[in-house]
């Protein structure tokens, strides 16, 4: 039986970079990646709508969340520039797009995965797919791993098993459970970067409509806004600004409202003037038709109804006092939040294994020598925009490097 020096559980973003950094650091070591899916990087090829938002030029603490306040020290030692240099070394050039989002120049997530796979192949990293690690035991000089197919021994272990989000692409709780066996604790997990469920009476009629809006999520006294295209669905709202803001809910809908501004380029008084002018100049008098060419027809109808008018009411009879509630609905269309879509639809898991018992330089457990962890399994979650992959690159690279360096022979 081969005795491995570094065994990596999980062949996703953080596991593959960990394997490469370990083998580059010590080419003489036997490195094994065990992946339960039939191939590595299944989640990675689906990132960024198939384009892979690989990182962001603004990697700062403001874009990350953790229950440990000192979490940003974990980003030291492998920065954005190191990420760029690393990917350049395997042939992936970067292209920057809006909001600092960085993609591979090819705009293909598959090319990022191919480049990582080819580098693993070049370095002779051993990869076993369709094999799930079920047990991890301490053994003489290291660990014994039991999978559904075999058993292995390894001097060091890197848990790169990801989080609970998106089970179809490999998401599961194995990583949390394996680490808990060694005394690590897990904070509450919640679906993150996911669609938001809302009250349905107003939304149902809008199903399928997309609209560029300014969206505000209010949770208790806190609020945050984002601009972009939302999609009305049978359960509530989806689309980039919704996913971005969903982080704030931490899986909990208590006292939360979404407020939609359907005309963000115009202020309240501008919209009042627009409507007054329309009433004067448009021949058709039914309120139902007042917003033609201004708002999506069904959105216009929802605005009228929620402001307390009938679609058949006469527009020309409205005075300014009556126009104001209509404009309020255009600028502040409010929906009660009832929940978020679950882990199966979420891109990322919020929360995770408490990082306070890990060394921020090496990613090694302080509770179990030779045990390392990286990526989403740990309690560091990023905003939508390349931040979660950057965490996978940073933590995976550091874990691989330090596990390899720890092997004495
Ligand atoms: C649809 C989608 C789009 C996304 N887009 C972006 C984006 O554009 N930018 C961004 O920054 N982030 C994005 N993310 C988030 C990002 O993909 C993850 O945060 C990142 O992949 C986490 O890396 P990881 O290595 O920790 O986990 P993963 O990439 O999930 O890898 C973990 C691997 O471990 C394997 N595994 C688990 N348990 C076991 C076991 N017991 N034995 C063997 N193998 C096991 C899993 O099958 C999986 O392949 C997206 C996520 C999704 C779902």
Image (tube, helix red, strand yellow):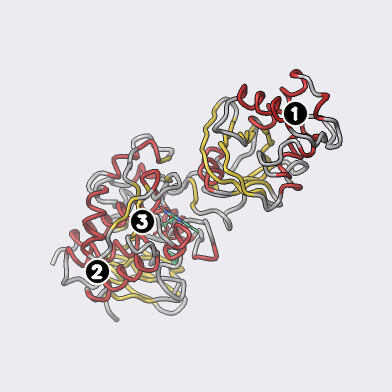
Left or right: 17, with 338 as reference point: left
**Residue 52 figure quarter:** bottom left
Q: Which dot marks residue 103? A: 3
* In this rendering, the label closer to the viewer, 1 or 2: 1
> Is the residue under label 2 in contact with that under label 3 (CB below 8 Å)?
no
Which circle's residue, 3 or 1, is located before the other in the chain?
3
Seen from the viewer's position, the closer of residues 157 and 198 is 198
Seen from the viewer's position, the closer of residues 302 and 392 is 302
**Residue 18 figure quarter:** bottom left
Residue hosting label 1? 279
Left or right: 17, with 280 as reference point: left
Tell me the quadrant of the picture where the C terminus can be found. Answer: bottom left
Left or right: 20, with 198 as reference point: left
* In this rendering, the label closer to the viewer, 3 or 1: 1
Which residue shows up at 21% across the image and 63% down it?
A: 89
Tell me the quadrant of the picture where the N terminus can be found. Answer: bottom left
> Is the residue under label 2 in contact with that under label 1 (CB below 8 Å)?
no
Which residue shows up at 39% across the image and 68% down it?
A: 110
Q: Which dot marks residue 5? A: 2
Q: Secondary structure at mark 1?
A: helix
Neighbour class for label 2 at 10 Å: few (<14), some, many (≥20)?
many
Which residue shows up at 28% across the image and 73% down it?
A: 118
Residue 308 point in image, percent of width and height: 81, 29
Residue 100 at least partly seen: yes
Residue placed furthest toward the bottom: 1
Neighbour class for label 1 at 10 Å: few (<14), some, many (≥20)?
many
Q: Secondary structure at mark 2?
A: strand
Q: Which dot marks residue 347? A: none
Above/below status of 137 relative to 333: below
Which circle's residue, 3 or 2, is located before the other in the chain?
2
Above/below status of 176 relative to 110: above
Neighbour class for label 3 at 10 Å: few (<14), some, many (≥20)?
many
């Amino acid at each position: 039986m081969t005795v491995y020096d570094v065994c990596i559980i999980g062949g996703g973003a953080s596991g593959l970079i960990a394997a490469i950094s370990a083998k580059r650091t010590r080419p003489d070591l036997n490195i094994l990646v065990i992946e339960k899916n039939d191939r590595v990087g299944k989640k990675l090829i689906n990132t960024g709508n198939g384009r892979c938002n690989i990182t962001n030029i603004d990697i700062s603490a403001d874009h990350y969340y953790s229950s440990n306040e000192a979490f940003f020290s974990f980003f030291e030692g492998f920065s954005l520039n190191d990420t760029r240099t690393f990917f350049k070394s395997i042939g992936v050039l970067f292209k920057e797009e809006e909001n600092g989002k960085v993609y591979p120049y090819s705009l293909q997530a598959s090319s990022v995965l191919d480049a990582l796979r080819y580098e693993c192949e070049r370095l002779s990293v051993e990869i076993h797919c369709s094999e799930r690690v079920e047990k991890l035991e301490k053994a003489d000089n290291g660990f014994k791993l039991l999978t559904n197919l075999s058993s292995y021994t390894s001097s060091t272990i890197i848990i790169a098993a990801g989080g609970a989000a998106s089970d179809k692409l490999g998401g599961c709780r194995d990583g949390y459970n394996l680490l808990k066996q060694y005394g690590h604790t897990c904070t509450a997990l919640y679906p993150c970067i996911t669609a938001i469920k809302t009250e349905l009476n107003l939304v149902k009629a809008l199903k399928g409509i997309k609209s560029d809006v300014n969206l505000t999520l209010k949770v208790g006294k806190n609020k945050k806004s984002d601009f972009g295209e939302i999609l009305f669905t049978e359960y509530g709202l989806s689309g980039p600004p919704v996913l971005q803001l969903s982080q704030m809910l931490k899986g909990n809908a208590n006292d939360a409202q979404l407020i939609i501004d359907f005309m963000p380029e115009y202020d309240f008084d501008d919209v009042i003037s627009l409507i007054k002018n329309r009433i004067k100049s448009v021949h058709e008098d039914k309120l139902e038709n007042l917003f033609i060419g201004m708002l999506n027809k069904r959105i216009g109808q929802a605005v009228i109804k929620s402001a307390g008018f009938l679609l058949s009411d006469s527009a020309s009879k409205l005075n300014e006092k009556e126009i104001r509630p209509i404009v309020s609905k255009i600028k502040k269309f409010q929906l009660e939040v009832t929940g978020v879509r679950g882990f199966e639809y979420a891109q990322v898991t919020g929360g995770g294994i408490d990082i306070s018992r890990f060394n921020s330089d090496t990613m090694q457990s302080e509770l179990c020598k030779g045990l390392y962890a990286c990526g989403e399994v740990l309690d560091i979650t990023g905003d939508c925009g390349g931040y979660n992959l950057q965490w996978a690159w940073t933590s995976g690279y550091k874990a691989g490097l330090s596990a390899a360096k720890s092997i004495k022979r």
